[in-house]
Amino acid sequence: MKLNPTKRLAVGLLAAALPLSLAACAKGGSSSAGGAGGELTMWTHNAGNKDELASITQIVNDYNKSQTKYKVKIQAFPQDSYNQSVVAAAASKKLPCILDIDGPNVPNWAWAGYLAPLEGMDATLSKFLPSVIGKYNGKTYSFGYYDVALVNVTRKSTLDKYGIRVPTIDQPWTKDEFTAALKKIKASGAFQNPLDIATSFTGEWWPYAYSPMLQSFGGDLINRTDYKSADGALNSDKAVEWAKWFRSLVTDGLAPLKSGADPAKDFVNGKTAILYNGTWTATDTRKAFGKDTLFLPPADLGNGPKIGGGSWQWGVSTNCADPKGAMDYMKFAAQDKYVASVSSATKNIPATDAAATQVPGYGPGGDNQVFRDYAKKYAVLRPITPGYPFIATEFTKTAQDILNGADPKGALDQAVKDIDANQKSNGYFK
């Protein structure tokens, strides 16, 4: 059988994912395509996240009680095997009606034919943060309840003690200021880690957390004019400068090569002076340090501060036997009160202004308003191309190699070569 060259990536993922999906089906019981007889199946990655799963379950319960035509039935998967299970289910045309998707994977799943466009929701979704809307080729395929902002967490007393300026959204640290602050803290000998960038995290964390640093230098993961090549973006002079700086954080003793298992805990315990992490750390760090806690904007490394945008989102599959039912649920679930309940459960940024007023701290003047401000001003979406999963894997490997001492230019050139070959072999996903 001759394969359609534009689907090679999806086929390759299916081969790798099939065993996991079969295991999930065996353990989870029914996993067939939904929509028949008024039952709308829903898959989520939240089996290991009881708070988020509880908030989604409440939405489903409310929807099921609100009408008698449809009944949504949830099946929750562990996050580590979720994507593989979805890809494998797509091979046998047994995707659920409704499913959640990690934001940067939306273009790949839309291109592969897993997702159906969301129809009739433009007015509702116009009130959501742009970073939580999954689009591809001019169509909307998903929306999320929340986003996350990356921040530098520290204590005001620490900065004051060492005479370091407190940066603001209007006047963030420059690269030189950031470096000088870290070296001043290191010289004090008071902290084992002047900075912890959470290198012990795995998977999507690496492109989510560290490609904004690359972009702040002026590089990028791929040329975004046509998404065909990474040449001149990921191996540009600015990208090489990022790579050298990234490595210098370790060689200069400013950040550990491998963070501890829980970097936030190391910060709370006084091991780390400045923690680079997501806004999900706000509750625990405030509990430890109260008003002394600061959530600083990322440093301007030359091209303005940048943070990653886009988190988990919800969409409708092309396998659903009753797409009208699935869209009926999606419209019901997009209410502000549900945006508020899910973002509150996950301790993340509410996706709409109206929901923000319902979540403690996120209303005007609230302690968490700054996180929404960062998301609105600094968020950069990961490249909107079906080739993103491959790009993410290449970037992760390359960044890890650079931290471990690989030649920056050589490592970036190889990543560009591999990414370009994948884009070309897939016909540039046309």
Image (spheres, helix red, strand yellow):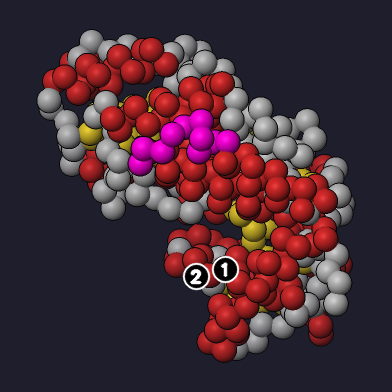
Rendered position, 258 above or below 83: above
Residue 240 on image: x %, y %: 51, 26
Q: Residue at x 47, y 11 (%)?
A: 171
Q: Secondary structure at mark 1?
A: helix
Q: Nearer the viewer, residue 407 or 29?
A: 407
Q: Secondary structure at mark 2?
A: loop
Q: Quadrant of the N terminus?
A: bottom right
Q: Nearer the viewer, residue 67 or 153?
A: 153
Residue lying farthest to the left in this orientation: 189
Contact flag, marks 1 and 2 (Cβ < 8 Å): yes
Main SS, magenta residues: helix
Q: Nearer the viewer, residue 106 or 203?
A: 203
Say if residue 408 shows up in the picture: yes
Q: Label 2 belongs to which residue?
A: 78
Q: Residues within 10 Å of mark 1 (few under 14, many from 20)?
A: many
Q: Label 1 belongs to which residue?
A: 82
Q: Amino acid at mark 1?
A: Tyr
Residue 137 on image: x %, y %: 84, 45
Rendered position, 406 above or below 29: above
Residue 67 on image: x %, y %: 76, 72
Residue range highlighted in magenta: 404-413
Rendered position, 133 above or below 195: below
Q: Residue at x 46, y 32 (%)?
A: 408
Side of 372 where 327 appears, left or right:
right
